[in-house]
Amino acid sequence: MQGIKISLLLFLISFSFIAFAHNDIRAIEVLENASSEYLKAGGVSAQFAIHIKDSKLIQTFEGDIKMKGDKFYLSTPDIDTWFDGKTQWAYLKQNDEVNITEPEAEELQMINPINILGIYKNGSYTCKYLGERQDAKQKSVFEVELNPKNKKGQITKIVLQLSKIDFTPTKFQVFYKNKLENIIQINKYEKGQSLSDQIFVFDKKKYPEVDVIDLR
């Protein structure tokens, strides 16, 4: 299950940017507005809950993320991740170790939650506008569905909910062939945060006992 969590987070931490063929024009408009609002937001801080569902159980855990441009810091009960735009540090709390990598652009698509907003642009997903909805808090949201072009993959679809007021993400649902479903609920989303670049860099002084493994 921890592997599922980490894979989800690496998927989660992700929204990017291209091909409009076969995409719903209204869906593109909503996603473009969401991406634009994120880029204008400056520093962003968010709190979220992830619900991992299958036919037998529901597992829930919470976390928070700080983002600025292509940088982020993600904290969950099992793993803390720092990314400064080039280098990534992943602190596996159970193992008391930090793995250092330099992920490629394609890998980053699966690491930063905000990147889901633009994954259709790389041509691997198509998008469809599902309409306006009332979310769990009775607030108006736009709903967009992303469908993978590669039907051999494990993901069958992704459903996004974005605030009708300012296009901030409020909920993600990721559906898998094995009937697993991941629900990411954004509980708090704050824009215009003053975030130092040091927030996105692992500070060894704060973790003197951890085993650092350089995988670059």
Image (cartoon, rainbow, N blue to C red):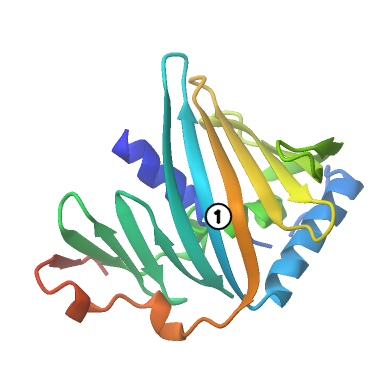
Q: Quadrant of residue 73?
A: bottom left
Residue for point 49% across, 41% down = 50
Is 92 situated left or right of 69 in this image?
left
Residue for point 48% across, 20% down = 178
Q: Is residue 67 visible?
A: yes
Is 107 situated left or right of 88 in this image?
right
Q: Position of residue 111 (x, y in %)?
A: 47, 56
Residue at the right extreme of this rendering = 25
Q: Quadrant of residue 24?
A: top right
State how many labels appear: 1
Q: Tell me the quarter of the image containing the C terminus.
A: bottom left
Residue at the left extreme of this rendering = 209
Residue for point 65% across, 44% down = 171
Q: Tell me the quarter of the image containing the N terminus.
A: top left
Q: Position of residue 110 (x, y in %)?
A: 50, 52
Q: Which residue is mark 1?
A: 113
Q: Nearer the viewer, residue 144 or 216?
A: 144
Q: Is residue 122 visible?
A: no
Q: Crowding near pointer 1: few (<14 within 10 Å), some, many (20+)?
A: many
Q: Position of residue 174 (x, y in %)?
A: 58, 35
**From what the image shows, is residue 172 above or below residue 208?**
above
**From what the image shows, is residue 92 above or below residue 103?**
above
Residue for point 49% across, 24% down = 180
Q: Secondary structure at mark 1?
A: helix
- Mark 1 belongs to which amino acid? Pro
Q: Position of residue 30 (x, y in %)?
A: 83, 53
